[in-house]
Amino acid sequence: MRPLAHLQTDAWVGIKGIFTDIDDTLTTDGALTPDALQALADLKEAGLSVVAITGRPVGWSEPFAA
């Protein structure tokens, strides 16, 4: 798998958002890190929606939704 930075600019045409796992993808040791928060902010600024998904119970996700 190649880093997203290696994609050609036109590869992003038509993409409106991304889905991402939470556990150990957005979080490190159960916490959002500054670089993950910055990445989310950069995606928002670029006009992309981000949908965080998990296999955990819905109550576990409430702090992230807030």
Image: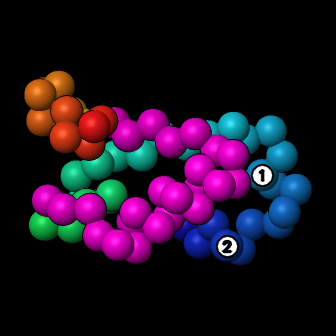
Crowding near the residue tagged with mark 2, few <14, some 14–19, many ≥20 C-alpha atoms within 10 Å: few
Which secondary structure, mark 2?
A: helix
Is residue 32 a member of the stretch shown in magenta?
A: yes
Magenta highlight range: 30-53
Residue drawn at the location 88% of the way across and 56% of the way down? 10
Crowding near the residue tagged with mark 1, few <14, some 14–19, many ≥20 C-alpha atoms within 10 Å: few
What residue is disc 2 on? 5
Percent from the top left, x then y, of residue 5? 67, 73
**Above/below status of 34 relative to 60:** below
Percent from the top left, x then y, of residue 12? 78, 52
**Residue 4 lies in quadrant:** bottom right
Residue drawn at the location 58% of the way across and 62% of the way down? 42
Asked whether residue 56 is in view, the answer is no
Is residue 26 a member of the stretch shown in magenta?
A: no
Q: Earlier in the sequence, mark 2 or mark 1?
A: 2
Percent from the top left, x then y, of residue 13? 83, 46
Amino acid type shown at disc 2: Ala
Q: Which mark is residue 12?
A: 1
Which secondary structure, mark 1?
A: helix
Residue drawn at the location 22% of the way across and 52% of the way down? 23
